[in-house]
């Protein structure tokens, strides 16, 4: 029963170890999948960083273009002012013409409005793109933090499972050692029992041989006794005057009746015992004369 209990415990430990190994492999696959997702998100984050840098460089180019347009506008305004000043000096007495200063002011205002409009549109487009990128980056960062928390939890679960697996392996090893020790002890006890059985069988055979020798000696002594009794009876009858032949016949008949009645039966039961179980049994009967 102890062996069966230990074997059952070992089987349960093996099943538990297989279950933990399967769980560990599943968690490892999940961890690898999460790590691949994290690597993908990191690549997306790098792409977003590159896109942001590209947009910043485009904004810088637009600002430089705006500064260049402003500079060209100022140079053109100065040139027009110079032309307007020279023509005014030449045509002093001419009829009043168009107000070039108001025209230049309108042109300058239009250029400034166009430049401001372009700058505003570029700024709005940039802000929209930056806002979209920030939202996407925030979402990705949140997902990344969540994935990191999940990876941490999975790692803790994996460590706990590894500790539990190691505990079960140690328990399995101790149970196997206990089983080996128990088997060795039982084998030693079985060897002692078999040795005791062999010694008892030898003693039984010796006792049977002694009994047979004693029976033979007893038969001889009984025969001698019977002969002596017959001789004594013969002598007594001779002394009393009876017939010798009749006495001898009667004595011989009595002797034969005694010898035929003194037969005993010896029944021997031989059993073969292996590991504490009776494997075979044999009954032998021996008839002996007393």
Image: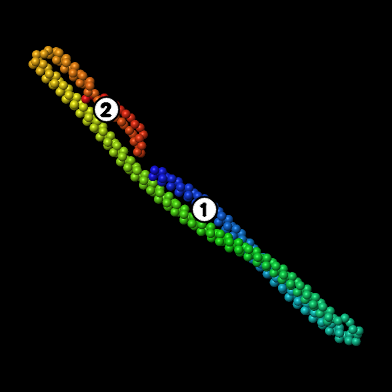
Q: Quadrant of the N terminus?
A: top left
The residue drawn where x is 29% and y is 29% is 268
Residue found at the far left of this picture: 239
Q: Secondary structure at mark 2?
A: strand
Is the residue under label 1 in contact with that under label 2 (CB below 8 Å)?
no
Residue 269: x, y in percent?
31, 31
Q: State the residue in front, 106 or 289.
A: 289
Q: Name the residue carrying label 1.
A: 24
Would you place residue 228 above or below residue 142 in this image? above
Residue at point 76%, 72% (across, down): 117
Hey, which residue is sitting farthest front in the picture? 240
Image height check: is 133 above or below 112?
A: above
User: Of residues 123 and 222, which is closer to you in this image?
Assistant: 222
How crowded is the residue under tag 2: few (<14 C-alpha within 10 Å), some, or many (20+)? few
How many neighbours does mark 1 have within 10 angstroms: few (below 14), some (14-19), or many (20 or more)? some
The coloring applied to the image is rainbow
Is 211 in front, or is 92? 211
Mark-to-mark CA distance, 2 and 1: 71 Å
x and y, in percent, of residue 77 in the image: 80, 79
Q: Position of residue 29 (x, y in %)?
A: 55, 53
Horizontal side of 197 relative to 127 (left or right) equals: left
> In the figure, is residue 209 to the left or right of 143?
left
Residue sitting at x 90%, y 87%: 93
Please tell me which residue is depicted at 26% across the width and 24% down the height of the picture: 287
Q: Position of residue 230 (x, y in %)?
A: 14, 19
Question: What residue would you read off at disc 2?
Answer: 266
Q: Quick check: 89 above or below 247?
A: below
């Amino acid at each position: 029963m102890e062996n069966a209990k230990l074997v059952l415990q070992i089987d349960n430990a093996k099943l538990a170890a297989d279950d933990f190994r399967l769980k560990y492999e599943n968690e490892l696959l999940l961890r690898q999948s999460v790590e691949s997702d994290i690597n993908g998100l990191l690549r997306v984050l790098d792409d977003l960083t590159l896109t942001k840098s590209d947009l910043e460089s485009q904004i810088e180019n637009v600002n430089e273009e705006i500064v260049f347009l402003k500079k060209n506008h100022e140079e053109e305004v100065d040139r027009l002012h110079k032309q307007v000043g020279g023509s005014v000096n030449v045509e002093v007495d001419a009829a009043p013409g168009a107000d070039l200063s108001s025209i230049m002011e309108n042109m300058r205002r239009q250029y400034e409005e166009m430049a401001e409009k372009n700058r505003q549109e570029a700024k709005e487009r940039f802000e929209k793109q930056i806002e979209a990128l920030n939202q996407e980056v925030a979402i990705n960062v949140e997902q990344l933090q969540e994935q990191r928390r999940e990876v941490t939890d999975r790692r803790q679960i994996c460590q706990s499972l590894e500790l539990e697996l190691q505990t079960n392996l140690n328990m399995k090893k101790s149970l196997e050692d206990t089983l080996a020790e128990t088997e060795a002890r039982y084998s030693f006890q079985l060897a002692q029992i078999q040795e005791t059985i062999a010694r008892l069988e030898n003693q039984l055979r010796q006792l049977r041989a002694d009994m047979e020798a004693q029976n033979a000696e007893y038969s001889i002594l009984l025969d001698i006794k019977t002969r002596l009794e017959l001789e004594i009876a013969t002598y007594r009858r001779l002394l009393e005057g009876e017939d010798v032949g009749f006495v001898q016949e009667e004595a011989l008949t009595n002797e034969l009746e005694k010898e035929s009645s003194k037969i005993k039966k010896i029944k021997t039961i031989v059993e073969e015992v292996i590991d504490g179980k009776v494997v075979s049994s044999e009954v032998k009967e021996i008839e002996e004369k007393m």
